[in-house]
Amino acid sequence: MQSSLATINTPDTTRHFSKGAVALEPLTLAWASRRERELVIGLAIREGRQTMNLRTMPGAELFVLRRWDGRFAGWAGVDVRSDPEHPELFSQFVYPEFRGLGLGGLLEHVWWSFLDHAGCAKGFMRMELDSNDALCERRLASGYYRVVTAEELGSRFVGACRKCELFGNACGRQIFLEVDVRKALAASIRSRGPLDIAALPMRISAGDRQLTAALEEEAVQ
């Protein structure tokens, strides 16, 4: 199987790649510390993105693509505890200079692996349509997403939107999606091979058209 993620590397053999004139150092995929969580809230505000989940939901968890200097290439969040009937996926983000390298797909792969490990057959997300219409269409075309109504989700999930700083402002047209975790995970595995959620932190090196996941025998410190 041709995978978009290359085989295992060690820290000594992880290479530096380039995208155009921009050198891309190896990254670390890891669960965010409390300090990093607070940093991401500030960075998300700066990017005009919602922070409702991280600010108001105690069960929300965050994983980051950490750069060598402590900055981030991206992040995404997941929450299986705040509303157990509706495990939520939120705040997937990759900085522009790191896009086109498969990192967005890697963040989604972590979503599916985490939910599957937690025994969740479905995941749910909120999307703002005006700025994410193309992404929404791609997700629906994948075969493992479907649109769900506010009535299906219930007042607890839908009502949380009112705590969001973008509600009724930048978030003018909203849609809710449900994802079939098993189907999504199978698609990610076909694309880049298996990902062991217990292996985080994990060393990642990014190249022009592919991503190399370096699962280390010892955890990255």
Image: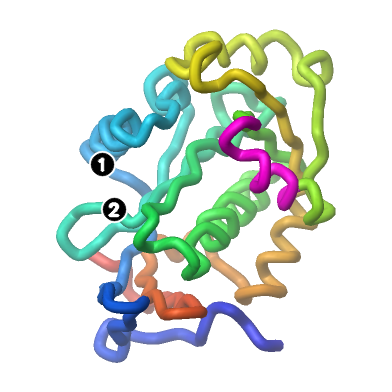
Q: Is residue 62 magenta?
A: no
Q: Left of 158 or right of it: where is 30? A: left
Q: Name the residue type under label 1.
A: Glu
Instruction: Write the residue at 75% across / 37% down.
Output: 178
Residue that appears at 15% across and 60% down: 69
Q: Main secondary structure of the magenta part?
A: helix
Image coords of residue 44 (percent x, y): 35, 34
Q: Are marks 2 and 1 in contact (CB under 8 Å)?
A: yes
Figure quadrant of residue 182? bottom right
Which residues are the magenta region? 129-139
Q: Is residue 30 visible?
A: no
Q: Residue 220 in the image: x percent, y percent?
A: 28, 67
Q: Is residue 192 left or right of residue 219?
A: right
Residue 134 belongs to the span the image colors magenta:
yes
Residue highlighted by disc 2 = 72
Q: Residue at x 38, y 72 (%)?
A: 204
Query: Could you say which quadrant of the image residue 13 lies in?
Result: bottom left
Residue that carries the numbered disc 1 in the rendered image: 36
Q: Is residue 163 above or below residue 209?
A: above
